[in-house]
Image (tube, rainbow, N blue to C red):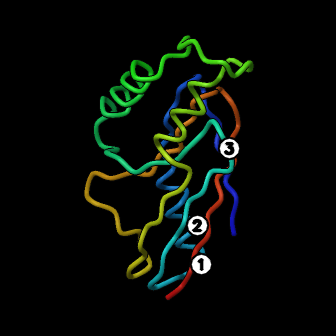
Amino acid sequence: METLSVSTSERVDLVDITSQVAQEVAKRSVGTGTVTIYVPHTTCGVTINESADPDVVRDIKMHLTKLVPKDGGFRHSEGNSDSHIKTSMIGSSENIFIESGKLVLGTWQGIFLCDFDGPRTRKVYIKIVEG
């Protein structure tokens, strides 16, 4: 298993980590297999979405904030209940196929670390399985 360290710059931030994941796959020289990307945080997730148009990331951030506002009257006393809920909506892991040593992603797809309680430095675990 490999560990990436990813820094975010805003409270709600999506960071494209596709190239870092692809580099880890290339290092292993895996022809065929899968890669699991897992984020071990309760206020941070990972998703696959369009990476070509930055407005997609902007729209995701804006609408998740509208759906689950920070000041939603939550009982959790740390002031980040919205972050926990957004993480549950997005999820903490993604699995991607590897074929011919490359990630199998659609033309416009990218892998994003989604921080909902930043800015912070987050860990991303990458597990590659051949086969």
Amino acid type, label 3: His
* Mark 2 neighbour class, 10 Å CA radius: few under 14, some 14 to 19, many 20 or more: some
Quick one: label 3, few (<14), some, or many (20+) residues within 10 Å?
Answer: some
What is the three-letter code of the residue carrying label 1? Arg
Q: Marks 1 and 2: in contact by CB < 8 Å?
A: yes
Q: Which residue is mark 2?
A: 24
Foreground: 68 or 95? 68
Question: What residue is rendered at 28% in x and 60% in y?
Answer: 106
| Depicted 118 relative to depicted 31: above or below | above
Q: Residue at x 59, y 22 (%)?
A: 11
**Horizontal side, residue 82 vs residue 55: left or right:** right
Q: Secondary structure at mark 2?
A: helix
- Element carrying mark 1: helix
Q: Residue furthest front?
A: 75
Check the picture and name the quadrant holding the N terminus: bottom right
Residue 108 horizontal/vertical position (percent): 27, 51
**Circle nearer the N terminus (3, 2):** 2
**Label 1 Cα crowd, 10 Å radius (few <14 / some 14-19 / many 20+):** few
Residue 125 locus on image (x, y percent): 65, 59
Residue that mark 1 sits on: 28
Which residue is disc 3 drawn over? 41
Q: Is residue 15 left or right of residue 64?
A: right
Give the number of the disc on residue 70. none
Decide which of tag 3 and tag 1 comes sooner along the chain.
Answer: 1
Tell me the distance, in whole angstroms, between the alpha carbons under discs 2 and 1: 7 Å
Q: Position of residue 9 (x, y in %)?
A: 60, 26
